[in-house]
Image (tube, rainbow, N blue to C red):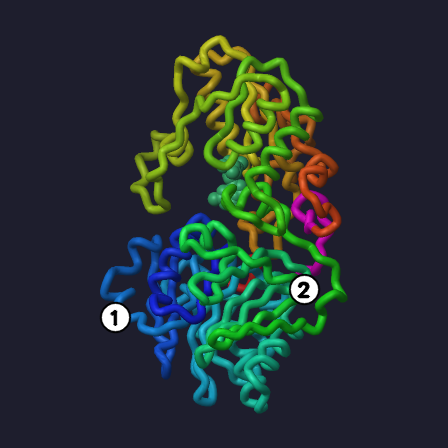
Amino acid sequence: MCGIFGISRHPEAARMAYFGLYALQHRGQESTGIATFDGQHIRLHAGMGLVPDVYDEPTLGQELQGQVAIGHVRYSTTGVSVRKNAQPLVVRVRGIEIALAHNGNLTNAAQLRGELEDQGAIFQTSSDSEIFVHLIAHSLAEHKTLEDAVVAACDRVRGAYSLIILSEGRIIALRDSHGFHPLAMGKVEGAYVFASETCAFDLLEAEYIREVAPGEMVIVDGDTMRSRSLNDSGRVPVRQCIFELVYFARPDSIVFGEDVYQCRKRMGFEMAKEGPTNAELVMPFPDSGVYAAIGFAQAAGVPYEQAYIRNHYVGRTFIQPSQSMRNFGVRVKLNPVRSMIANRRICIVDDSIVRGTTVRTRVVKLRELGAREVHFRVSCPPLKHPCFYGINFSSRGELVAANHPLEELPGLLNLDSLHYLTIEGLLRSVSQPDQYCLACFNGEYPVACEGQCACCGSAE
Ligand code: 5GP
Ligand code: MG
């Protein structure tokens, strides 16, 4: 998963990109980059770490000059976590400079990379996103226009891609025809702005116009905006990633036309219907479980409490304690309010169970503190199948629900009861139930993973 951003044309383009990426930080904490066009050349600043740590005043004020900017925050799903895999990727082909920011995962990356290398391409990174750059370069070498070159590249790749491209002062923003990942378009002070999620627009006081449609390519040249379709647009079903609504997107965003906060609350309502409890209090694992827990508590008429407190300052690089401090990672992140727990019948709500680590370790803690009963409600169906399109659970072996029969899970996770929202319940929570990818729940993949793809980890 990743976050992408673009703006044209604004006197403080780099600074706007910086704040846009700041709002998208939850989509990737590993590395970030901003590329600007200064009127002649593309300038790039990228680094490992969080947005506020990678840029400083001289970078935004002087180094990243220009009125057009694109940016990226990265959460590696393919390719290792190193500086050179940070995006935007910037290349120069036949005198044309291109910067590209990608959110998604290609399923035929290994095959295309092999073909391109056979034709003499030299890859700079281990990220599948670089394939776009080489495909575009290839078409430019055949004297195609940039726009046609981008369309031709999209004809070759399979999988998930929301893209923002900067070249010669123009911005091209597009979504693959399945529309796996989001991309929104807005306007601020006359400038067009693009972002993975609308929460970035709120921070910039930009007006949200609409989403870039699945299979749509938007071209912004100065003050003018045009739209054109990718070749497979409308020929494949729309399959947006429902996990964006379940977990990934910020609750203050509008994604796929859904108000994410309200959508998560509806998942909670549905769970209360499907899996009622006799609990005395409902509590989330914060922050991701909060919104479904509020919905659940309201629908069930059970008091909502925040009896687990989250430490917000846990970065990815905290110093690991000694071996004897087991499950430190979860403990440092979530700590219970003791007085809420003893002798109570508790119902926990979380958005998802992936490996089961959070549930297992946090439920043990509640038992130690004297909880009488611990029930668990999950606001999505069991995660049984890996994602090939960019969500970070890429191997079946990691998924606890894929490796144990459902009826064994309450025992395994030390729970008095466990209910996962059904697929039907989940789809009742959204307004366009036929437009979602549900592959992680039902194994029905809209795009096949072509063997040795990077998302299986075998191409590394
Ligand atoms: P588990 O502890 O079962 O492995 O993971 C479940 C927890 O991880 C849930 O609280 C959920 O909010 C969170 N989660 C779900 N998907 C992802 C993901 O793709 N990345 C990260 N970092 N956390 C996730
Ligand atoms: Mg969580």
* Whether residue 217 is situated above or below residue 21 in the rendered picture: below
Mark 1 CB lies closer than 8 A to ligand 1: no
Please state which amino acid type lies under the numbered disc 2: Ser
Measure the C-alpha gap from mark 1 to mark 2.
38 Å
- Inspect this view and state whether residue 116 appears: no
Residue sitting at x 29%, y 65% = 60
* Whether residue 413 is situated above or below residue 181 in the rendered picture: above
- Inspect this view and state whether residue 5 appears: yes
Whether the magenta-drawn stretch holds residue 441 is answered as yes
Depth-wise, is mark 1 or mark 2 nearer the camera?
Answer: 1
Residue sitting at x 37%, y 67% = 13
- Return the residue found at the far top: 343
Q: Which mark is residue 177?
A: 2
Quarter of the view holding residue 403: top right
For mark 1, what is the residue? 62
Instruction: Give whichever of discs 1 and 2 has the lower sequence position.
Output: 1
Secondary structure under tag 1 reads helix
Secondary structure under tag 2 reads loop
Q: Position of residue 385 (x, y in %)?
A: 65, 46
* Whether residue 407 is situated above or below residue 164 in the rendered picture: above
Nearer the observer, 254 or 411: 254
Nearer the observer, 410 or 326: 410
Nearer the observer, 211 or 345: 211
Whether the magenta-drawn stretch holds residue 89 is answered as no
Q: Position of residue 251 (x, y in %)?
A: 51, 42
Q: Position of residue 3 (x, y in %)?
A: 48, 57
Q: Is mark 1 in CB contact (under 8 Å) with mark 2?
A: no
Quarter of the view holding residue 277: top right
Magenta residues span 436-449
Mark 1 surroundings within 10 Å by alpha-carbon count, few (fewer than 14), some (14 through 19), many (20 or more):
few
